[in-house]
Image (cartoon, rainbow, N blue to C red):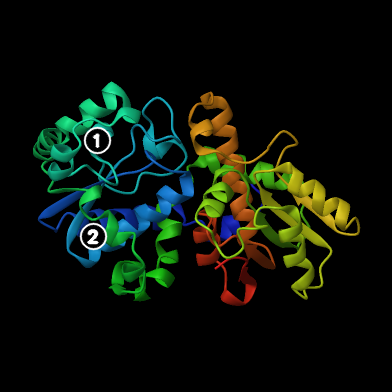
């Protein structure tokens, strides 16, 4: 049976409340004469995609645009189940397979196609898609009776300027800056289906976590490589176990129980070796050596599914911790930080 003492269950909307809210959202959404189709799960990791999707939903409301979702080919589903692989459906969907080819974050512009008709590292299929994209886009929009694809406004709704914009959305009790109000969409959009909810509850129960613990995200893999290539402030040691351990030591927090959200088990081992007096909990397995999105996409679905459910559970555990140290440029932080009081959160990178 699902455990009843964790925040996951208390945060979950009841079936009745969820269905009432979904019906109201769909009715409100359909009032807008123009529509945008957002493709989720095609180009980045799960929480990066979802964070952008939530921003797009808010952007559509602010600008009076109907939001629709395409998820049939996302990297976090199998057999065309799309969003319903792990979550409850919450909006009107698009199912046109043309989304896969022409609904992208940064579509090529006609001027670019004329200047560079062929890009060698994209291969023959990739270049064909580029060249026919203006025509394919029109066919997709006409067949779906829509007006925009996500690339038309991606730079707008994924911008710092939009996150600083004020939003007043009565349906979700929003009245503040987008950056802070986005949390109010999460319990609605990210409502796990019953099967996923049960699996997360079971995994969490198996950890036997104490009531009082802190949490930290220790990131490795492609995110750290990207940060170093962009010369972030802490690029010299970011991603090394010593960086994270020093953050914990310098925090002034008095704790003995710590949950580690990580994609690299070497980080967990380093914490255990440096502070054997701490009780360390984690869902990271001994074979994990850093998340690389392209590698993840090529994995067998059964492996990907287990990894995703484990990630969902780890994020929920961090949300419920007494205090969380968040990796500021890592996407799960968007969800964790949004759902924690500011007094219980500290970012490690700016």
Please name the residue shown 35% across and 74% down the image.
164
Seen from the viewer's position, the closer of residues 40 and 274 is 274
Closer to viewer: mark 1 or mark 2: 1
Please name the residue shown 79% across and 68% down the image.
249
Vertical order, 262 against 144 (above or below): below
Q: Which residue is mark 2?
A: 60
Is 346 positioned to the left or the right of 269 in the image? left
Answer yes or no: do the residues labelled 1 and 2 have beta carbons within 8 Å?
A: no
Q: Which residue is mark 1?
A: 99
Vertical order, 37 against 61 (above or below): above
Badge 1 marks a residue whose secondary structure is: helix
Query: Residue 265: x and y, percent?
Result: 73, 42
Q: Which mark is residue 133?
A: none
Please name the residue shown 14% across and 58% down the image.
31
Seen from the viewer's position, the closer of residues 119 and 153 is 119
Is 142 positioned to the left or the right of 28 in the image? left
Decide: few, some or many residues near mark 1? Use Cα within 10 Å; few <14, some 14-19, many ≥20: many
Vertical order, 306 against 193 (above or below): above
Query: Does residue 16 appear in this view?
Result: no
Query: Residue 313: x and y, percent?
Result: 61, 47
Instruction: Tell me the quadrant of the picture where the N terminus can be found.
Output: top right
Please name the residue shown 68% across and 59% down the image.
216
Query: Does residue 236 appear in this view?
Result: yes
Seen from the viewer's position, the closer of residues 20 and 347 is 347
Query: Residue 137: x and y, percent?
Result: 15, 38
Instruction: Tell me the quadrant of the picture where the C terminus can be found.
Output: bottom right
Query: Residue 309: x and y, percent?
Result: 57, 40
Counting residues from the start of the chain, the first of labels 1 and 2 encountered is: 2
Q: CA distance from mark 1 to mark 2?
A: 19 Å
């Amino acid at each position: 049976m699902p455990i009843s003492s964790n925040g996951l269950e208390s945060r979950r909307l009841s079936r009745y409340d969820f269905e009432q809210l979904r019906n109201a959202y769909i009715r409100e959404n359909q009032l807008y004469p123009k529509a945008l189709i957002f493709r989720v799960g095609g180009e980045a990791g799960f929480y990066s995609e979802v964070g952008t999707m939530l921003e797009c939903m808010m952007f559509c409301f602010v600008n009076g645009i109907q939001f629709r979702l395409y998820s049939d080919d996302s990297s976090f589903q199998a057999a065309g189940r799309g969003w319903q692989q792990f979550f409850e459906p919450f909006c009107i969907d698009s199912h046109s397979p043309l989304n896969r080819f022409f609904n992208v974050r940064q579509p090529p512009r006609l001027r670019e196609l004329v200047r560079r008709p062929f890009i060698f590292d994209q291969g023959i299929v990739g270049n064909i898609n580029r060249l026919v994209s203006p025509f394919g886009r029109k066919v997709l929009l006409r067949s779906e009776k829509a007006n925009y694809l996500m690339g038309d406004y991606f730079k707008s709704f994924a911008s710092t300027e939009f996150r600083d914009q004020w939003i007043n959305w009565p349906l979700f009790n929003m009245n503040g800056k987008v950056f802070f109000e986005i949390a109010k969409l999460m319990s609605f959009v990210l409502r796990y289906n019953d099967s996923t909810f049960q699996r997360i509850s079971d995994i969490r129960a198996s950890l036997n976590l104490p009531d009082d613990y802190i949490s930290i995200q220790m990131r490795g893999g492609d995110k750290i490589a990207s940060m170093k290539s962009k010369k972030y402030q802490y690029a010299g040691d970011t991603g090394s176990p010593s960086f994270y351990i020093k953050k914990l030591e310098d925090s002034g927090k008095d704790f003995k129980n710590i949950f580690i959200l990580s994609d690299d088990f070497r980080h967990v081992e380093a914490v255990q070796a440096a502070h054997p007096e701490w009780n360390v909990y984690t869902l990271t397995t001994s074979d994990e050596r850093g998340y690389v999105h392209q590698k993840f996409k090529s994995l067998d679905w059964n492996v990907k599914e287990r990894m995703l459910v484990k990630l969902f559970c780890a994020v929920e555990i961090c949300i419920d911790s007494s205090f969380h140290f968040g990796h500021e440029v890592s996407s799960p932080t968007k969800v964790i930080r949004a759902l924690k009081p500011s007094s219980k959160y500290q970012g490690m990178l700016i």
